[in-house]
Image (cartoon, rainbow, N blue to C red):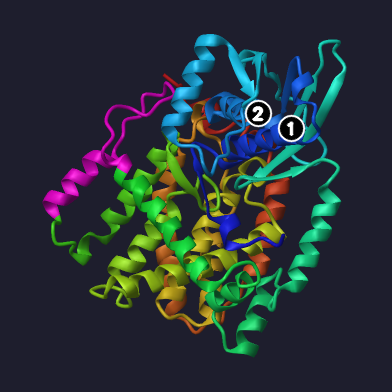
Amino acid sequence: MAVGVFDLFSIGIGPSSSHTVGPMRAAAQFSQEIVKAQVIDDVASLRVDLFGSLAATGHGHGTLTATLLGLEGFEPELILPEQVEERLAVMAETGKITLAGRVELDYGVDDIVLRPLTVLPFHTNGMKLAVMDAAGEVLHEATYYSVGGGFIVKEGQIEAEREELEETKQEQPYPFRTAVELLKHCNEQNMSFADVMLANELIVRPEEQIRSGLLAIRDVMQGAVETSIRRTGDLPGGLNVRRRAPGWHRRLEEEDPDRSPEYWQEWVNLVALAVNEENATGGRIVTAPTNGAAGIIPAVLHYAVEYTKTCRGKSQAEKDDATVRFLLAAGAVGVLYKEQASISGAEVGCQGEVGSASSMAAAGLAEVMGGTPEQIENAAEIAMEHNLGLTCDPIGGLVQVPCIERNAIAAAKAINAAKMALWGDGEHRVSLDEVIITMRETGRDMSDKYKETAMGGLAVNVVEC
């Protein structure tokens, strides 16, 4: 299917979309294939190999445990954090998993084979899974790639999926791959980015379902903040990173009980930090468009509905309308990054994660604030232009330092980008398409040690403990 808004904004668990959500989704699909092939009852053993970035930073990103949960049949959209804790505790105690929820196998984290220096041809986030019978004969095997944002592709189906993508795009009333094409639709039909995205979504589901689905996404984003500010202690993982969201929230409640506009920056920072601390905890968050960048869009959306003239003091229904338009416009820009470049930190560095999210958020805010299509495109361009070259080098392979603060900084960039664009007339020297292509080429030229491998930058220059 063509990439839609619910692909770019999906509910899952932390800490990483490419290294947690994607592997869990792939493993769950593999377990379903075994059942469908009617070989599940003959399975006696299992083998899982992780390659490239999945192997290099898998421990810190929860890749190994997410894969085991997926093999048991759990889906990232449906599993709850308490279920994660419960099943992982049972696995640790027994040394067993229940494949597809039916066959118990002696298998655990230590049995997964890690190949960090071997990169499969299609993508650095590769994983191979196989099940064998009692004689050691392979019953079923498959290779998957986690390509960013929780998206997965299966080897042998890559070309077929590309063809299906093109076919479904042609079913859309306003298909687009580039910003030029998106702007053309807007100008010819007198539509905004959100209007175009909505029209294309309507071929899949009715408008009320789109609206309710996007508001549910908003609610999960808000829920992540509410959960995060109630937590105590340091973040998990061994870096001893203290949670800041609870203390910041208490201070803001004391200093700004009436939500004065002068405190907008502090509230935006709080939302970004809270969401990403919840993500680092392995909590329930919205991939937007990745987990590592999950705090940016909620933070800028908070600014849009609480601090802009369009929404401040308005009814909840009006704020809901603005939320839907924000997410649709942001989703339209997200499509451009998926079509022309990448949102995978392991492929193009953090510019593909935080940069894409900042660009999407800037577009959403410009849409809510009444920008023209040209101004919205300009906002998205400004935000990405000033995230070019951003590396992915998290300390300890954990989505904590510098990831959490980086979300707050990128949210502020998105807000500034939207404001700068709205003070212009939409005319600008560098186009959004040009900056997306530049991001893709910069990622291609970037050393692998700066692309989620924990082999460069802060990951090696900062002592973990």
Q: Nearer the viewer, residue 95 or 16?
A: 95
Q: Pinpoint residue 7: horizontal percent, then vertical percent.
A: 60, 55
Which mark is first along the chain, 2 or 1?
1
Name the residue at 70% across, 32% down. 31
- Residue 399, horizontal then vertical, whole percent: 48, 35
In the rendered image of this protein, does residue 175 appear above or below residue 398?
A: below
Amino acid at dot 2: Ala
Q: From which residue to which does the magenta span run? A: 227-255
Quadrant location of the N terminus in the rendered image: bottom right
- In percent of width and height, residue 5 lies at 57, 62
Q: Which mark is residue 100?
A: 2
Location of residue 255 with respect to 111 vertically, above or below: below
Confirm whether residue 451 shows in the render.
no
Residue 289 counted in the magenta span = no
Q: How many marks?
A: 2
> Dots 1 and 2: beta carbons under 8 Å?
yes
Disc 1/disc 2 C-alpha distance (Å): 7 Å
Whether residue 415 is visible here, answered yes or no, is: yes
Question: Which residue bears the numbered disc 1?
Answer: 35
- Membership of 239 in magenta stretch: yes
Q: Residue at x 67, y 14 (%)?
A: 111
**Residue 46 against residue 161 in the figure, above or below:** above
